Image: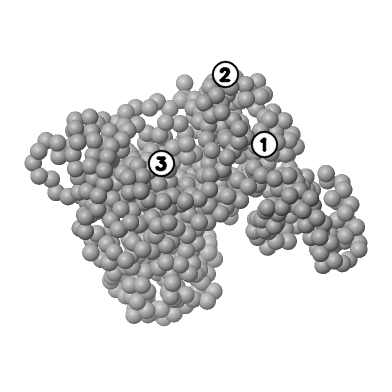
Amino acid sequence: MTRYTYSSYPYRKPPELDGGSHPAVPVIIVGAGPVGLAAAIDLALHDIRTVVLDDNDVVSVGSRAICWSKRSLEIFDRLGVGERMVDKGITWKVGRLFHRDREVYSFDLQEEPGHKMPAFINLQQYHVEQFLVERALEFPDLIDIRWKNRVTGIEQQPSCVRLAIETPDGAYTLESRYALACDGANSSIRGMMGLDFDGRAFEEHFLIADIEMDADLSNERLFWFEPTFHSGQSALLHKQPDNIYRIDLQLGPDADPAEERKPERVTPRVSAMLGGRPFEIDWVSVYTFQCRRMKAFVHDRIIFAGDSAHVVSPFGARGGNSGIQDIDNLCWKLAAVLLGRASRDLLKSYDEERCHGADENILHSSRSTSFMTPKSKTERLFRDAVLHLAGEMPFARRLVNSGRLSEPCSLTHRGLQRGQDMASGRLPPGTPCPDAPVETARSSDDWLLGHLGGEFRILHQPDGIGSEAHLPSKLPALIVGRDLKDREGLLRQRYALEAGVTYLVRPDQHIAAAWNRADAGRILDALELAGGQA
Amino acid sequence: MSRLRTDDGFAGKSDEFYAMLIDAHDGLDDEQSEALNARLLLLLANQIGDLDTLREAIETAGRTG
């Protein structure tokens, strides 16, 4: 049996219930899912203490978010769990698309070589959460995870947030300077605050199932439009670790969720798809999906991240991945505010930059959904015409939309990038930093991104006649040739490095500013504009 | 010699085009949609103009159904 064994984490009586006074904590995180746990770890890396509250005491039941993108893995790597996730996960890059029984085309996500992280892995959310919990436990003085602590009330004061919390031993209150609501799509914090969550709900029902099967199917994403084995309009099969396969079947708008969840309904559907292979059902869910977001993610001292702030359909892997990107964007800013290095205004840029990310995800997700669930005769006519042309006409393959897979969001011209110095021919401010193979004192087989992030940093290509001397001495710098060697010439290529080129890189591994010729004054001005302090 | 373009002509914006096309039919009944499609096809055919290309397009459309 390879199936995941759920073990519960120990509930402990909160110290507040034992009387005595307890100092306020800087940040309370509501929700110990991937987003909340990533936030706790990221803040711990900035020496910020957090209490994480979760109403449950186990990891995610069912695989839920399974598909983690390269950008998320790079963030997880910065948090110290990326390699473990890649080792456990199923790395995949090929997708095959079928119309009825005919393969229309396949795609290969294998991007150029020379990145530490693969394009995508599949890894069940319960593994991701377990790895994050175990990483969080490595910060016993900074992260206090409290299982079976349910938030029942939240109120904002001018200088703090006060939460009412229920536990098996009774109720208590806890104060913090900020609270992060990472409590998922049905966020109770959002509900208690009566905040909006506008957008669209789609009527189509989908059956999602994890099945255990002793079959060595290839690591490919298989997607069918109008499969002959299933009367609905689409089907998806994706491999996960431990012989678990994800199946997603479109059921139509009239399906009865309670009926469709029953094993006697699920088994024949899956059997038809798998052509008689023996299998066991591990987890089943029937869902309809929605594309919604809050108007604002920052509400004074209460900040929303992940599904509590925005939801999309699952096709495209834009849910879990966007939540991790929220945390990457938010935590260095929150840490700077809490450490007195930046004003609270810096948090507005989280709102702007990540609302933009959410809009991008909602746009792609809505289009995929429309393609997969045509609502009128004409829409269906065009959808089918695209599928019929796609076998022979490469242009039509680009129109087939079974989910546009998550890509890192560019922040160019937005938020902190507005008014920043840019250099012609170089990466524009707001670009997520591409990785590159480098050689460092740490390893001859090292990667650039392991040396960027966490704090503001300069990446500089010396001009050979002393350009390094013009860099501000107070800011950490990576000097090409001194601190790292460009193993394969890919660093030069990806960053368009030429003699004298300088980048200022944000703590979340995005370009903050770029110069063909920099001097300390301009770099420090750019640093200030980007919310940093030397 | 083949004139009909088979590779992506939307310069990476095929999803935008598709959304534009579907949105154009929003609120129309089937008959109005068919009429819109006919007008659209005539406009685009005129834009192409070249009869060999159009003949090839007609043949391809007829074959791939």
Q: Please indicate, yes or no, whether residue A376 appears anywhere in the rendered image.
A: yes
Badge 3 density bin: few <14, some 14–19, many ≥20, Cα 10 Å: few
- Decide if residue A228 is on the left or right side of residue B39: left
What residue is drawn where x is 80% and y is 55%?
A: B35
The quarter of the picture where residue A102 lies is top right
- For marks 2 and 3 on the same chain, the one whose residue lies earlier in the sequence: 3
In the rendered image, which residue does mark 2 sit on?
A264
The dot on residue A186 is: 3
Q: Amino acid at mark 1?
A: Gln
The chain containing the residue under callout 1 comes to: A
Q: Amino acid at mark 2?
A: Glu
Which is in the foreground here, disc 2 or disc 3? 3
The reply to the same-chain question for discs 1 and 2 is yes
The chain containing the residue under callout 3 comes to: A
The dot on residue A233 is: 1
Q: Foreground: A144 or A502?
A: A144
What residue is drawn where x is 53% and y is 41%?
A: A289
Q: Indicate the secondary structure of the residue bearing disc 1.
A: loop
Q: Indicate the secondary structure of the residue bearing disc 2.
A: helix
- Decide if residue A398 is on the left or right side of residue A23: right
Badge 2 density bin: few <14, some 14–19, many ≥20, Cα 10 Å: few
The reply to the same-chain question for discs 2 and 3 is yes
In the depicted structure, whether residue B43 falls above or below residue A291: below
